[in-house]
Image (tube, rainbow, N blue to C red):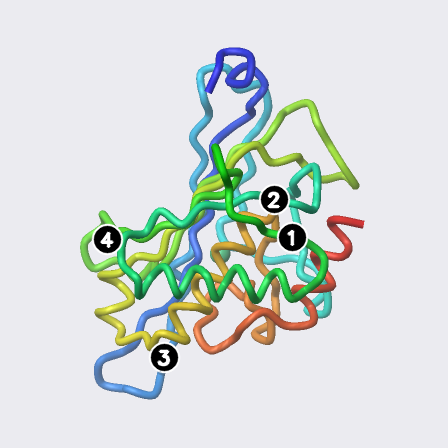
Amino acid sequence: MNNRLMGTLLTFVAVVAGLSFATPSHASAKIVTDADATEAVKSSVSLGTAEADGGAATGKASLTPAAKRWSTTTITYKIASGSSYYKSVWQNAVKTWNRSGVVNLVPASGKADITLSTSNSPVKNDATVGITYSSYYNNKNMNGLSVLASAKSYVYKNVANRYHYSKGERTNVAEHELGHALGLEHNVGKHSVMYYATRDQSVSKPDVNGLVHSYR
Ligand SMILES: [Zn+2]
């Protein structure tokens, strides 16, 4: 990243997708707590106030809200995950968002806008199963939304394993994180992939509505 770009980036914001916490004694109770947190780390050249939603969702369930967007609807991505299993998880998430017809995620030939990856959660026994870091410009707005400069999403393998997530559920987590990487925030309703503790839900109508609204 060059200095000029650094100078225009506002902050690095981590949006944690909360996801779940299965109570051992209640195998069917898949989601019991909000493990969601947003952590903001200002860069040394930060000029604005970093948002901190604390996982709170606002608005109507029928329209997934957004805080940011990319400047164009064609957005490049790269899958940095080594395993074929997770490559497939991320690839499926990309396909699902592309099916919305609103954004066109294309593989990057050079530097990618969005990096999709996997790692293990650095926090012992944490229930956060995915996280997305993004940076955006402090001096650009489109439709009232901050314009993204970069995003990196992770699915935490060790947490997904501990809570016995199926591949489909991991894909839903990947879709949730990719939703953040596209600028979406949490939806108040459970029938959105952007519900803070999504596990069973894939991208649905409210999420596509949110993208349409953001990228109009
Ligand atoms: Zn989230």
* Residue at which label 3 appears: 30
Q: Is residue 6 above or below residue 184?
A: above
* Residue at which label 2 appears: 75
* Residue at which label 4 appears: 120
Q: Is residue 22 above or below residue 110?
A: below
Q: Are marks 1 and 2 in contact (CB under 8 Å)?
A: yes
Q: CA distance from mark 1 to mark 4?
A: 29 Å
Sooner in the amino-acid sequence: mark 2 or mark 3: 3
Q: CA distance from mark 1 to mark 2?
A: 6 Å
Secondary structure type for disc 2: strand
Which of label 2 and label 3 is nearer to you? 2
* Residue at which label 1 appears: 104
Task: Tell me the kind of residue under disc 2.
Answer: Ile
Residue 67 falls in image quadrant: top right
Residue under the point 44% across and 46% down: 78
Which of label 1 and label 3 is nearer to you? 1
Task: Tell me the kind of residue under disc 1.
Answer: Asn
Q: CA distance from mark 1 to mark 3?
A: 33 Å
Mark 3 Cα shell of 10 Å, populated few (<14), some (14-19), many (≥20): many
Sooner in the amino-acid sequence: mark 1 or mark 3: 3
Secondary structure type for disc 3: loop
Image position, residue 133 (x, y; %): 45, 41
* Towards the viewer: 46 or 8: 8
* Towards the viewer: 128 or 166: 166
Image position, residue 134 (x, y; %): 50, 38
Sooner in the amino-acid sequence: mark 2 or mark 4: 2
